[in-house]
Image (cartoon, rainbow, N blue to C red):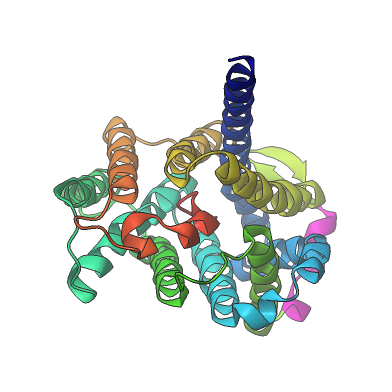
Amino acid sequence: MPVRTSQSSQAGRGKGVGLGLALVSALAFGGSGVAAKPLIEAGLDPLHVVWLRVTGAALVMLPVAVRHRTLLFRRPALLAGFGLLAVAGVQACYFAALSRIPVGVALLVEYLAPALVLGWVRFVQRRPVTRAAAAGVVLAVGGLACVVEVWSGLSFDVFGLLLALGAACCQVGYFVLSDQGSDAGDEAPDPLGVIAYGLLIGALLLTAVARPWSMDWSVLSGTAHMNGTPVSAGLLLAWIVLIATVLAYVTGVLSVRRLSPQVAGVVACLEAVIATVLAWVLLGEHLSAPQIAGGAVVLVGAFIAQSSAPAKPSPDPVAGGGPERELSARGTAT
């Protein structure tokens, strides 16, 4: 009996630590857009901000990549997909969207990814999904209609909304690639190693696209403005690299190891709430009551779509939330 009590108490402490780490991850990820937008408004191109974020984080995570160098030979397709889609694609589209639409709206549009994954499963792979999952998709789409205020002919920049939707599609592409690249007999790759190599590959890809040698580096030595308040541009960049990327990814992975991907995904939904509140307080980006209500519906729908089990038993991770989904159990990679 004493042994069982000790084990249960240790398990309880482990879950408590996991929830704490998941909250830290959601808070760190939620602050990325709020810190990036002033840099964009100060004169940096969105692609340059993404390049600085990814390259800086890749350098910090380089020792982890060296430790897991065998991944380059064991899972090259997974690493390439993570670097291209979950790192370069998602963040480039998301930061470009920030230059045109509010932070909270961009992130809520990106939260359509779980619903879009189920659309791929149902209509492209022609695999059944549960009614609960279908209801989650309907809720997410309906909530998004409230967020963008379709009744007023879309109150936000259409191209900005398309960029945010592009970020969601990049998430879908990564999930699909993980699904097709997983083999039941293979040992699951270490998520920290995948993140480290994803950042390195993403940095290489973004270097070719962003051409950082043409960036106005003087912006980083000056100040940016958060709703009129001057803030050091270097401090904002340090936050984006160290807190909103490295700390966010690492704590997210560690939380999933102590919790189930589904529970970690629920906590991760707070990311959109945190980002919206921070943008409201620090950037003065106010959302209307219908938009706030719609955002809540998007998150509920995304959670239902993400956590619903497949209609029939299946080893595939996209439909059922298998091992590969743990690499991005947050639901986003912003």
Vertical side of 259 occupied by 67: above or below? below
Q: Residue at x 28, y 43 (%)?
A: 304
The picture quadrant where one finds residue 320 is: bottom left
Dominant secondary structure (helix, strand or loop) of the stretch shown in magenta: helix
**Magenta-drawn stretch contains 56:** no
The picture quadrant where one finds residue 125 is: bottom left
Residue 56 is left or right of residue 248, and the answer is right
Q: Which residues are magenta?
A: 212-222
Q: Position of residue 330 (x, y in %)?
A: 50, 49
Q: Position of residue 267 (x, y in %)?
A: 48, 36
Vertical side of 183 occupied by 190: above or below? above
* Outermost residue toward the front in this view: 1
**Magenta-drawn stretch contains 216:** yes
Q: Residue at x 28, y 47 (%)?
A: 308
- Residue 56 in view, yes or no: yes
The picture quadrant where one finds residue 139 is: top left
